Amino acid sequence: MAAEWEPVIGSIIAWPLIIPQPLVIELAKGNMPLYVMVSDEINRYAAEDTFKGWGLSMDNVHFVVTRLGLAWGWPRDWGPFAVYSASGAYRLADPRFIAYPLAGPDCNDMRPDLYPKERYIGDDLASSALAESLGFDIVPIAAALTGGNFLVDGLGTAFSTCVIRMKNRSLGLSDEQLSALIKEKLGIDRHVVLPNYEKTGIQHIDCAVKPLDEETLLVMRVPEDHHEYSIIEEIVQKLQSLTNAYGRPYKIIRIDTGRYKDEMVAAYTNSLIFNKKVFMPFYGIPEDKQAQKTWQEAMPGYEVIGFENDITVPVMGYRGWQSFDGLHCRVRAIWDPGMLRMAHRRMDSTIKPAKSWPVEVTIQDFSKAGLIPEELQLHVRSHSDQKWQTIILSSTANPSLFQASIPGVKSGETVEYYLSAADRSGRRETLPRTAPADFYSFTVR
């Protein structure tokens, strides 16, 4: 499965809009395709007139006319996942979408759904209509994997709260069957299931935790006198006890939130990483700017943009972003079918002196256009230097694995480095993704 931060080629939203105008305009910048789900031609014409009035290029706007359900405005939840086969084939995975289960903190305390399941039938069918419009094959999955409660790292790990198991048990899937199914269909080897944290709610993990890369998690921190404080800290303790895909403890960054209405707290983790930008919800409270600063420090080189929202949601009647429903819930990314994918176990923060240190990186050309050998590079410098030294990566017996060596330096020095690649489709990528504005580093001890 594509990770939260990997390259995207567009986005999915729905009409009537429950996101603000500036966000729509930002999503369509740079000729990025914008797919708009509408229920009929009347709504299509209304949306088209509105977008033209905003100055959007209609060449970039694509309408998908299909039956919509009560969750029409939350494509993050009912929308498809991007899945790549070992050979690089791209498909959209379509889990079941059957209402929003409500649950308490107890992982056996599932409440009746807020609305009848029949009101969500259109949402469950919408991914098929979208896949047909996009021209991609779709893979049905006989499990309820609501997008806001199923976050992945691109290396076989997924994060959810335990309401996901409760819902699938009600569909007749045991916990073991659920694990086997997501491994078979999605390549998920490890499903990290965390405690529910709301008194009563839909318990979506993306309103509390956000993977920023394979080794870094952004986790909310509520005020100490808030009723969620102890359970969120319990979640942090569990995450601290885990190791990431590379066998190291996760780096956990805390993002402070505040109340925006009564006991409702701002869901700053519910933000969208959109190539080299981050779109985050603003709630009109003092904590907004500090949360934006936290995002900027956590994601060097990314442009972090905040959006306030005063739109009232039809039917449900609440206004703007919610603690259980932030910006990312209302936008679904479309990952790049021809992604130039890079993955790398960064060097440990401190390393013993040596003549050189080997570096390995996985590079996969899903476009199948072919990698450009001389553009597969390691860039290295000492912390005191301004100029990068470029070293060409060498191939290995594994066609997706490349390697090079960082020249040794004396003890006490800090080495900085990043990796880059290009293919014959015109795609170029780096690790970190905003290099050289961001880079990896280690100190020789």
Image (tube, grey):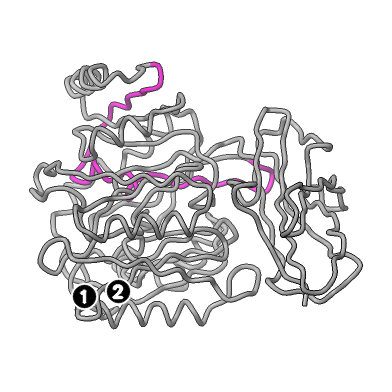
Q: Are marks 2 and 1 in contact (CB under 8 Å)?
A: yes
- Residue 78 on the magenta segment: yes
Which residue is at the front of the view, 220 or 135? Answer: 220
| Above or below for 60 versus 309 | above
The residue under the point 51% across, 50% down is 5
Using the image as rendered, state which of residue 215 and residue 437 is in the foreground. 437
307 in relation to 104, above or below: above
Q: Which mark is residue 276?
A: none
Q: Which mark is residue 196?
A: 2
Q: Position of residue 322 (x, y in %)?
A: 20, 56
The percent coordinates of residue 365 (x first, y second) are 70, 39
Secondary structure, mark 2, is loop
Residue 295: x percent and y percent? Answer: 42, 56
Residue 427 lies in magenta, yes or no? no
Q: Which residue is mark 1?
A: 104
- Residue extent of the magenta highlight: 59-88
Q: Nearer the viewer, residue 378 or 330?
A: 378
Which quadrant would residue 167 be assigned to in this image?
A: bottom left
